[in-house]
Image (spheres, rainbow, N blue to C red):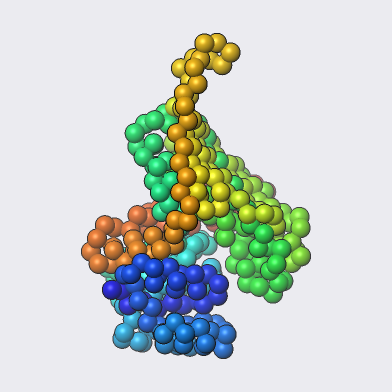
Amino acid sequence: MVRAAIVGLGWWGRTLVKAAKATGAIEIVAGATGRRALAEDYARAEGFVLHDDLGAILRDSSVEAVILATPHLDHDAQVIATAGSGRHVFVEKPFTLTKAGAEAAIAAVEAAGVVIGLGHNRRFHPHMARVRGLMAEGRIGTLLHAEGTMTAPNGLFLKPDSWRVDPRQSPAGGMAGLGIHMIDAMIDLVGEIAEVDALSHHRATPSGAQDTTAIMLRFAGGASGYVSCMTATAPSYRFCLYGSGGVAEIRTPGLDQFSFVPTPDAPLGGHATPKPPETSEIKGFDTVAAELAAWASAIGGGAAFPIGHAAMIHGAAVFEAIARSAATGARVRL
């Protein structure tokens, strides 16, 4: 059992506490938050000690690992401090907001020899594994293009003083909360991204924050890609790979629906017989518990956490490039 502390007890921090319990492999023994008075009853009910800050947690000898659900700008320094204390660390996405910050954080992790996990929970869904298998088997063929769109209504309800609408914390609209999941999926399945061209602007959120973001991508391997995210509409999710061998697609906010439509053997309008699609539906899979279970297993000497250090750094570099492109209107090469 991994004895962990949680830093950040907003709605997502509490989601992580619940998921940690569900793993059966992580015990939350301590916590800290910027608004302690709002978390005291919760900590008492959950049975863990509430400290004032990360520094106090790192002085608690009962803590062997730390889960960070904190504002994005704090991540690199907090990872460095946690690793420097000899604790394992799990950090919510985005990993860091800059490539330099990611490199410094990973250097600290590697120097300390601790295990780091990163909160790209959707990577752990069985339907993502299904697409990964299609790629490995060569059934998608030559990859032409990748597309991902993720939307949510949260921006309509955030107050102007929320850190989540601060452009320093969340550049390029919904990229930090939504679009970064699509970027991670594409890095996982398609490979490194070589070039980004982003457009991000405000349309509807009361706070005035950017709520509509679109990015064109070019991958190092030659395929193209497109990512969009919106924070002022109904929730949706669509991830799709187009290859010479067929089209693989995942839909719904819970990634419940999967389909693979093979490419026919003859042109349309001729004598082509459509190949039957492969479909699957999986409802209610707990991706957050799955990612935390993978982290706990790696701490215990099991398989390495599925997101490697190089991918963490590259994801941060892509995020930084997207933010720069959105701010300047220029295409950015990595």
Q: Quadrant of residue 301?
A: bottom left
Q: Position of residue 47 (x, y in %)?
A: 41, 85
Asked whether 16 or 201 is in front, the reply is 16
Q: List x then y, in percent, for residue 310.
A: 38, 54
Please, is residue 111 above or below residue 188 in the view? below
Q: Residue at x 74, y 56 (%)?
A: 202
Can you give x and y, in whole percent of width and height, for residue 111 in the image?
29, 68
Left or right, 104 with respect to 334, comes to left
The answer to whether 170 appears left or right of 80 in the picture is right
**Quadrant of image for the N terminus:** bottom left
* Snapshot quadrant of residue 307: bottom left
Compared to residue 91, the image places residue 277 above or below, namely above
Please identify the residue farthest to the top as the structure is shown: 270
The foreground one among 225 and 158 is: 158
**Residue at image location 51% in from the left, 39% down from the top:** 249
**Residue at the image position 36 percent from the left and 67 percent from the top:** 23
Where residue 48 appears, x then y in whole percent? 41, 85
Looking at this view, is 130 or 7 the one in front?
Answer: 130
The residue sitting at the left extreme is 301
How many labels were placed on the picture? 0
Camera sees residue 307: yes
Is residue 79 in view?
Answer: no
User: Which residue is at a point 24% across and 60% down the rendered structure image?
Assistant: 302
Q: Is residue 164 above or below residue 146?
A: below
Instruction: Establish if 106 lies above or below 203.
Output: below
